[in-house]
Amino acid sequence: MASIEILIAIGIFIGFGFGITFGIIIGKKQKPWNEITYEEKRNKKIMISAALILLIIDAISGFWEFLTF
């Protein structure tokens, strides 16, 4: 059985790969920032903020789980 550190490293690399792939796929359809409306800019800022908050919560919970395991 593999150690927990190896499994965590593999999970990080897989997550990074999926994130880059989805970012490229989604990014191809986007308009430049100066061509979108105020409402679209507001929605993008909200989505980015929500994603960052979820990322921070996920990182904190992951470190907590790692340290208490």
Image (cartoon, rainbow, N blue to C red):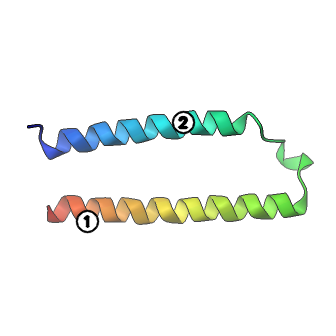
User: Which residue is depicted at the point 32% across and 41% down?
Assistant: 11
Tell which of 4 and 33 is nearer to you: 4
* Marks 1 and 2 close (CB-CB < 8 Å): no
User: Which residue is depicted at the point 88% across and 51% down?
Assistant: 36
Local crowd size for mark 1, using a 10 Å CA cut-off: few (<14), some (14–19), many (≥20): few
Disc ID at residue 40: none
Q: Residue 32, position in %: x, y?
A: 84, 42
| SS type, badge 1 | helix
Q: Spot the residue most to the front.
A: 1
Q: Horizontally, is 50 left or right of 32 in the view?
A: left
Q: Horizontally, is 18 left or right of 68 in the view?
A: right
Q: Give amino acid for label 2.
A: Ile
Quadrant in which residue 7 is drawn: top left
Q: Residue 35, position in %: x, y?
A: 91, 47
Q: Give amino acid for label 1.
A: Trp
- Please count the marks in the image: 2
Disc ID at residue 20: 2
**Relative vertical location of residue 59 with respect to residue 9 in this rendering, above or below:** below
Please report whichever mark, 1 or 2, sits nearer to the chain's N-terminal start. 2
Q: Which residue is mark 1?
A: 64
- Label 1 to label 2, Cα distance in Å? 26 Å
User: Which residue is depicted at the point 61% across and 39% down?
Assistant: 23
**Relative vertical location of residue 50 with respect to residue 17 in this rendering, above or below:** below
Q: Spot the residue most to the left.
A: 1
| SS type, badge 2 | helix
Quarter of the figure with the N terminus: top left
User: Which residue is depicted at the point 14% across and 61% down?
Assistant: 69
Q: Residue 43, position in %: x, y?
A: 76, 62
Local crowd size for mark 2, using a 10 Å CA cut-off: few (<14), some (14–19), many (≥20): few
